[in-house]
Amino acid sequence: MKTRKNLRHSKDKETGLQTLQSSVKWHHIVNSAPSLWDAISRLLSDQAMVLSLNSSFVDPLLQFESQLNIIESSFKMVFAIPSLEKVREMGTSEDDKEDLEDMIIWMNEDTSYLQERVMMIISSVLSFASKKVKRYASIDAPCLGVLAAELSLLCFHNDPLITHQASLGMCYLLWIAKCQNADIEEIKSTMCNSGNHGLLPVPSDTEFLLMDLQQDKTKITQYVGQTLKPSLLTDFVWSLLMRLSSSNCVTAFEASTMLKMTLEYHAHKVTMVSKIVDAIYKQLCEHSSHVMRHTLLRVITLLIRSSPKKVIFQLMDYPIPADNTLLLMWQAAGSESRMAPHVLKTILLILKGKPGEMQDSLMERRRFSLDTTNMMPVAASQALCTLLPISSYKRAVAEFFPQLLMALMLQLFYSSDLRLMIKDRLFYARDALRVLLNCSGLQKVDMALKKKNCWNQFSQVLSHHHRVYLVAKTLSDYNFPQFPETLHYLYKLSVEGPRRSEDSVIIVIFFTELLNNFFKDPFPEEFLVLFRNWVNDPNPAVSKLSLQKIASMAPVINKVENVRSLLISILDAFFSKDKTVIIWALLTLRKLLGKLNKVTYSSLSTRIASSYYPLMDHSNGGIRSMAIYHFGELLKDMSPYPWILNDMVTGGLVPLILFLEDTEIRVAKACKYTLKICASELNWSTSYLLKDKHHNFELVVLNICNNLLISHESYITNLISDTLGFLRSSRIYLRRASVILIGYLTKLGSHLLLREEIEVMLDAIDPVLRDEDPVIRELAEITYRDFKEMSLKLTSSNFKQIFRRLFSLIYLKKLKPLYNWPDNLADSL
């Protein structure tokens, strides 16, 4: 048997199996240890299986998995040296006794033979693989990163033989990695030009590389960082990270040094950053040593340089509130001053989210968080409380002040709702906002808001809009120096449109208050355009706020450019589905019209009147009454323009008459008020009938129809058409009133109608004959009978029809009551 010295100097060029035998020389006791013979036989069998798979037609994926399992099993057998106790049991013959005693003494004294043996085998395998790269430049070696980490640590072993083997292995490994990165055509070209068909470094280069790897950690990390592909370098970093917790202090220290050196220059190539950060968090939570804690936090700092977004997002993915470990990691992330803008940008991106918002599906989630709800914005707010006070962040905070201010204002709004969902009151957005003010030289603003009890009120759900107003007004009162960039950012947000409709409310309140304090009315046109657009915002609260602001500009309305477009946008708000928006639109328009110059007013009067008509039949009584009142005011304002009044009055006359019967007193009063204005402007003798003591609906209808016959005969057919639309109303009083009105109008304008038109009216009144209300049925029967009589008298002849119309113009006769009135009342007309 060879001595221990000869054992350590076995030749590297032997094959793998020969290396195994020569490294410990068990071959002469094979008969005493049949298990070793079985292992050798199995290794040969495994080799045959790998070769056969290479030439088979098995699915490539299955082939790769099978080969990987076989190779892994083979290596385990190679490294499975019998224990010292089993060696003592082997070889009972006298011939083996001396060799076994010598072997037992060696194994008992020093276990480094295990590392030597493994290193020799690995070096041989890597040497063989580096030769094969010549033919297969795309050779897949997924474990190179892990192996590089282990070899790099062994390059500084206290045993020079182990150091030599590890360095030699690193040379081959780096060469394989270099060939993996190079283009195959480039490699072939290099081969042809250099004449180096072995693709191995020349001996002098290898020796030089060996010296570098054995003497300088910086050289190792330099070579590894430059040569390994990102995925393999990530394995290298991960392996070193895992070795930090090694019980061997020397190994842990070397791993720490190599890890920091690698990330110092090559962190940009590392992938799976989130996994690394998560591993660091878990290691820090396990009561790591001071040295290890320092290294782990330094790794966070180095990773933030190249992957700030990945690091920050991972740090947000832990339960809130953050524990001490997480706060330490935040501080480490914030210690890199030049990355402050990138960190704040990422946090602002997270603050766009709404805390507590549910994710629709797992596919939409960024990663498997602890919960399906998004709580990252809350974590981001808490992180700002840690990061903003850091002195190195001062310049970045100044740069992002407007964005941080508005993001936290929105988070405060969200937090007021979030409080209802969670047990703990998480007001980190409020705390972060106070920190932001104090870090930005606005301590007086913070103190003023504290005196106004604003900060405590943010914990309440109600009146959040008022608190937003308080913050904006207090900032304005103290003439905060960040006003220009804040106003510019708010304008940018307003033009681009917010992410959520509820965000618009906060933006509009803040924007309006800043403008109120720094600009006199009217606003510059570019700002006024925003308010004009907000009038018809999908969010009713935004529409109301905009209308309120526009209403306040009534005294200067004539100085506003493009005032027509502003007024038209208010008219468009009449069609809102929200009744409060319509009411505010009515009030705002009326306030502006009271100050508007008459030229512009008259040019828009017809458009304004046509916008009032649909609101006179609105389902809300308040809107009906307001629209009718405002229509009357419009008629008074247009009294100097009689040629405009005729069309305006007749356009709204039908609803004005019918809603005299409205069950809501305020609507009926509004109709009387406006009809009096109509009668006054058109010189009708109807006003006395609209007084409460004289009021009778049919008397009013009869009187108006008689006045129409004299002054507005040409409008009668249009009025009939408008009245037909009310016959199918869901409100009983409207159906009853419309039957009466259409009866009088048709009787009055019978000479203007063709038989076909009467037939259409008969079809329209027919369903009313079966109305649920008996009074309506009775009125409908009278009206239907009159239509039938008229139909029989009418002709389709154009000539005869024209003759009848001319005769009616010569001989006008006022109508008499149609619906069974008492004789004394009929005679008084």
Image (cartoon, rainbow, N blue to C red):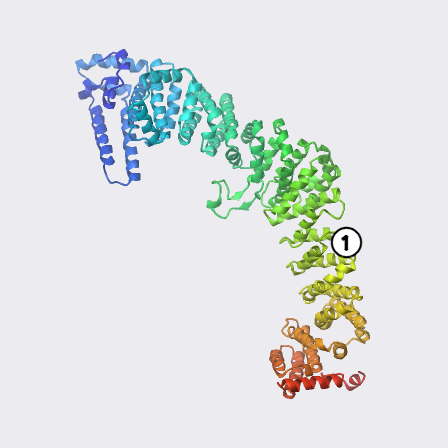
Residue 102 occupies which quadrant of the picture? top left
Identify the residue at image location x=59%, y=35%: 382
- Badge 1 marks a residue whose secondary structure is helix
Residue 714 occupies which quadrant of the picture? bottom right
Kindly tell me whether residue 128 is visible in this rendering: yes
Please provide percent x and percent y for residue 194: 32, 23
Identify the residue at image location x=48%, y=25%: 265
Please provide percent x and percent y for residue 55: 23, 36
Please provide percent x and percent y for residue 391: 63, 27
- The three-letter code of the residue at mark 1 reads Asn
Q: Residue furthest front?
A: 193
For this rendering, which residue is in front, 26 or 685? 685
**Which quadrant is the N terminus positioned in?**
top left
Taking the image as shown, residue 185 lies to the left or right of residue 460, namely left
**Which quadrant is the C terminus positioned in?**
bottom right
Taking the image as shown, residue 163 lies to the left or right of residue 339, namely left
Dot 1 crowding, Cα within 10 Å, few <14, some 14–19, many 20+: some
Q: Which residue is mark 1?
A: 558
